[in-house]
Image (tube, helix red, strand yellow):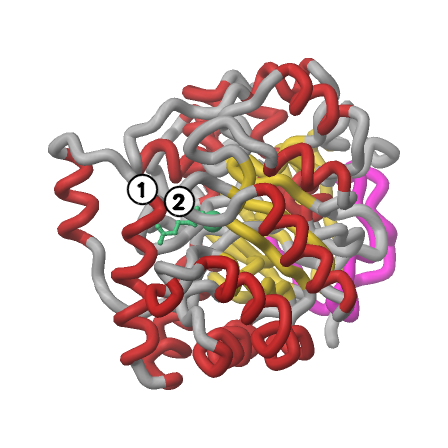
Amino acid sequence: MTDLLIDDIGTLVTNDPSLGEGPLGLVRDGALLIGDGAVRWAGPQTATPQAAADERVDAAGRTVVPGFVDSHSHLVFAGDRTAEFAARMSGRPYTAGGIRTTVEATRAASSETLSRNMRRLVAEALRSGTTTIECKSGYGLTVAHERRSLEVAREHTDEVTFMGAHVVAPEYAERPDDYVDLVCTAMLDACAPHAKWIDVFCERGAFDGDQTRTILAAGARRGLLPRVHANQLGPGPGVQIAVELDAASADHATHLSDDDVEALAASSTVATLLPAAEFSTRAAYPDARRLLDAGVTVALAADCNPGSSYTTNMPFCIALAVREMGMTPDEAVWSATMGGARALRRTDVGHLGVGARADAVLLDAPSHAHLSYRPGVPLVSAVWRGGEAAVA
Ligand code: NIG
Ligand code: FE
């Protein structure tokens, strides 16, 4: 692969404090040298290594940030829940029950339809700067349908999560413990080879603390790493379980006690906040400021799914996090890049330090703060993924 030099970068966010100012490793008037799909060099323009690159892009004083790392999404689904959204906007509350509507449509869809839908959403995410995206199953809820969802997800991303424990399958409504048994045995046997992570929706209306522990332990025995949908709709044991099991992430983390915040701060579990879900369900936002002030590592993700958050747009989430959750523009950009990488326990993405995968986004803006300062404006003007132009 040929070398690429991006120069005349007005603001370069590297997320590598050894390369520039503050936690964002900010370089003014910078340049970025890419080769063989990775970052070869990043720094001030005046210090650019002399070896000529095969290709040069003039950023003309604009901004380059690392590709966004969206560590939470549910992209394998079919069907439409516009009516549920409209009803919610006229006052009906969001509940976990809506998931079953999507389960019915997903089971009835062909694998080709599911794959085409996911491809469309991954491409949509890429156009707004997302270069790494995690995807969960959880709209199949039978052994065969969950395995199929994971096979579809794997066609489009390496970050695949088994979530047979999204809600109790409708066939098991009267005997939820039998469903938990199924998840822990035949379903995991079929699904574990196709996934890296296991996730459980630990919530009233979904799975309680004991069930969550049982399912995550069964996943761990098959080599799956835990993450948890925790404390989204109300207080509960999810965050404590995530910390106890050293989960990579506790996601949503909206309703937290002081003990929950303290436990997160003392752990290596990331709190992944999903402000587009609160936006789309007209719910109270999590308090990112409280978490950050306590020393918790915070990630931002879009939670794209047809029920609670039908968006793939990370810049929108950054703007919400700043306006509604008390994050500074710098913190929100870090959380949407490096924070997401931490939530996926990845060291090769989320930053533009030397050796990182060359995932970079050129913004039509003089600084990264414009991601929150100019909400809703499509600032992404080019995207490179692994050094290749993915959006131009
Ligand atoms: O992350 N909370 C559980 N799962 C999704 C919503 C799924 C749905 O409503 O279809 C979420 O918000
Ligand atoms: Fe989710």
Tag 1–tag 2 contact (CB < 8 Å): yes
Query: What amino acid type is highlighted by mark number 1?
Result: Thr
Secondary structure beneath disc 2? loop
Q: Quadrant of residue 266?
A: top right
Vertical order, 78 against 257 (above or below): below
Q: Which residue is drawn at the image coordinates 15% and 30% (left, top)?
A: 91
Name the residue nearer the viewer: 345 or 168: 168
Whole-percent x, y for residue 32 in the image = 73, 49
Residue shown at the point (82%, 32%) measured from the top left? 17
Q: Is residue 98 above or below residue 242?
A: below
Is the CB atom of the residue marked by disc 2 within 8 angstroms of ligand 1's nearest atom?
no
In the foreground, 278 or 246: 246
Which residue corresponds to mark 1? Answer: 95
Q: Give the range drawn in magenta.
A: 35-57
Name the image quarter holding residue 181.
bottom right
- Residue highlighted by disc 2: 205
Q: How crowded is the residue under tag 2: few (<14 C-alpha within 10 Å), some, or many (20+)?
A: few
Residue 86, image x, y percentages: 14, 43
- Give the mark nearest the N terminus, 1 or 2: 1
Residue at x 77%, y 56% (from the top left corner): 348
- Is 40 placed left or right of 283 in the picture? right
